[in-house]
Amino acid sequence: MAKDRSLVRASDIGAWAFCQRAWWLANVQGAEHENPAVLTRGTAAHEVHGETVRQAQSMQRLGLILLGLGGLLLVLAVLFWFLFG
């Protein structure tokens, strides 16, 4: 899969800021990283973190839905109390 050259990733900016020559070698010349196991571990760690963030977003969405339902029930209870209480 070809890289999208219009997208500038934060990791690219960090790599370039740390060492412009290393960034050029990796991204322009296609040189291999000297320790690919580190990159693999970093990718795996970011995937786990991404899944954690997705779960947190789902839980937040569920919490907001439940809060909305609770508010609706409160309004209905107050309305019922005024009409029939």
Image (cartoon, rainbow, N blue to C red):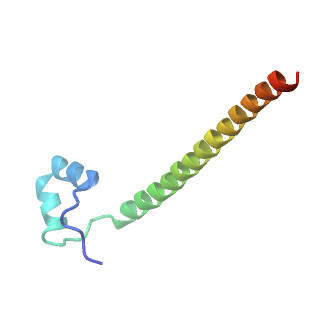
Near-viewer residue (20 or 58): 58
* Residue farthest toward the right in the current orientation of the protein: 85
Q: For the N terminus, give its image quadrant.
A: bottom left
**How many numbered marks appear?**
0
Residue drawn at the location 54% of the way across and 47% of the way down = 57
Q: For the C terminus, give its image quadrant.
A: top right
On the image, the x and y values in percent for residue 84 come to 87, 25
Q: Is residue 53 left or right of residue 75?
A: left
Q: Is residue 62 left or right of residue 46?
A: right
Residue 43 vertical position relative to residue 81 in the rendered view, above or below: below
Q: Is residue 77 left or right of residue 53?
A: right
Residue 85 vertical position relative to residue 68 in the rendered view, above or below: above
Residue 29 vertical position relative to residue 85 in the rendered view, above or below: below
Near-viewer residue (5 or 11): 5
Quadrant assignment, res 77: top right
Quadrant assignment, res 22: bottom left
On the image, the x and y values in percent for residue 17 come to 16, 47
Residue drawn at the location 49% of the way across and 51% of the way down = 49
Near-viewer residue (58 or 48): 58
Residue drawn at the location 12% of the way across and 54% of the way down = 20
On the image, the x and y values in percent for residue 7 come to 23, 60
